[in-house]
Image: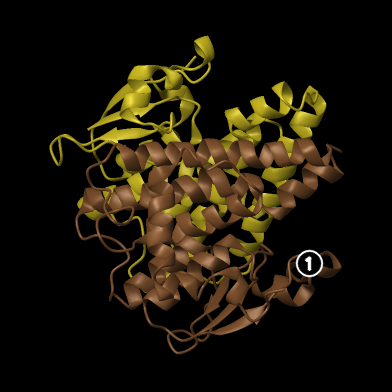
Chain colours: A brown, B yellow
Amino acid sequence: MRLYSYFRSSASFRVRIALNLKGLAFETLPVHLVRHGGDQRNADFLALNPDGLVPVLLDEAEDPTARMTQSLAIVEYLDETHPEPPLLPAEATARARVRALALNVACEIHPLNNLRVLRYLTQVLAIGDDAKNAWYRHWVETGLQAFEAQLASSRETGVFCHGDRPTLADITLVPQVFNAQRFDCDLSSMPTVMRIHAACMALDAFARAAPGRQPDAE
Amino acid sequence: MRLYSYFRSSASFRVRIALNLKGLAFETLPVHLVRHGGDQRNADFLALNPDGLVPVLLDEAEDPTARMTQSLAIVEYLDETHPEPPLLPAEATARARVRALALNVACEIHPLNNLRVLRYLTQVLAIGDDAKNAWYRHWVETGLQAFEAQLASSRETGVFCHGDRPTLADITLVPQVFNAQRFDCDLSSMPTVMRIHAACMALDAFARAAPGRQPDAE
């Protein structure tokens, strides 16, 4: 498989973890999101993905024409085409819980803090760096606090977000914690989040997917 | 089933469409997101869902303790527990396409325009109404233009977003178009989006789920 990826992109990070957990080899095709205004805005890349977003997964052995986008859709695809080890539990309400945790990060936290949003704040609304960083921390901290409350209030939370093996929820949580740490967010009130983050990062599949270990890392 | 819902909430609207498509009866439990600072911030509601977000689905016949959150996770749950009619296609890359379209709306457009984000812009960043409305239209218009490009460039687009019956992608698109129209966004460059929106709204399951037809509509 081939993955269009940027080392710091959380969404790319999620897919790298899933590929590693499944034991699937992949080639990284770097897309630099910052340099020269962003390679994702080049005509060649937009022809591949009109959204201008990474990651994009090509699985040419399965379907030579498919260009898969949106990290959570890609992870579900990998789970359906390579069922072992499963990234979702078996039972329907448990699957709903894991997907809801993942969507909490993917819909409530991450979209407010990606590059294009921060650019709009500084370039169009002309807010300063302090206000931009406060915006960033506000959404990450309130979002992860809600995530912590979800984890702490459920008997289904285990070594990982759901039980004792990693799922889609952990795959989505870990890159968000990386971002939070990079922007000096206060994570002291989130012991369950941080315990699970450490359990994940002790696994080779998560550690190898980290930004600093990618071929395009700076 | 019982659904905590607000008539104008797009995420609640998605779940109402899915319940109607599945032919499942449900009781609406209204949560007013605006009045008195928002019922979703009451202690009773936060005990139910620490995120303070609607929708929440209770399916007591299946599991008396489950409180399901996050609209896309709920729709997947309904599709797994009530398979007919299916809301996702059968084949893995087609499922990935439908999920990616839904996530395009749920992750790239909707999170930037919900109530709490607009409140932060006006209350914390003190931007005026014109700048707030420009922000709203910017994300909706660029997001739906990318959605249009995805639809227009694929042979898999049919009467609906994927083929000739409604899927998770249509369920997510229609509430976003409602919001766009309410805020006077320019949708003139999106003929495929608008054609599919009209095809959806001709179906009773979509029409009955619309904000104006809910028991808490104002």
Image spot of residue A179 (x, y percent) = 60, 54
Q: Is residue A162 left or right of residue A50?
A: left
Q: What's the residue at 41%, 41% (across, down)? A: A148
Q: Is residue A48 left or right of residue A75?
A: right
Is residue B124 positioned above or below B172 on the image?
Answer: above
Residue type at mark 1: give it: Gly
Residue closer to the observer: A140 or A109:
A140
Let me know if residue B165 appears in the view. no
Give the quarter of the image for residue B167: bottom left
Give the quarter of the image for residue A44: bottom right
Q: What's the residue at 44%, 31% (across, down)? A: B53
Image spot of residue A15 (x, y percent) = 49, 69
Give the quarter of the image for residue B22: top left
How many dots with numbers?
A: 1
Disc 1 marks which residue?
A38
Q: Is residue B54 left or right of residue A124?
A: left
Image spot of residue A205 (x, y percent) = 42, 74
Q: Disc 1 sits on a residue from what chain?
A: A
Residue closer to the observer: A23 or A187:
A187
Q: Residues within 10 Å of mark 1 (few under 14, many from 20)?
A: few
Outermost residue on the bottom side: it is A61
Residue closer to the observer: A72 or B197:
A72
Q: What's the residue at 24%, 38% (across, down)? A: B24
Residue closer to the observer: A129 or A116:
A129
Q: What's the residue at 40%, 70% (across, down)? A: A77
Secondary structure beneath disc 1? loop
Let me know if residue A130 appears in the view. yes
Outermost residue on the left side: it is B61
Is residue B138 positioned above or below B193 on the image?
Answer: above
Is residue A31 positioned above or below A9 on the image?
Answer: below
Image spot of residue B114 (x, y percent) = 59, 33
Q: Quadrant of the N terminus of chain B?
A: top left
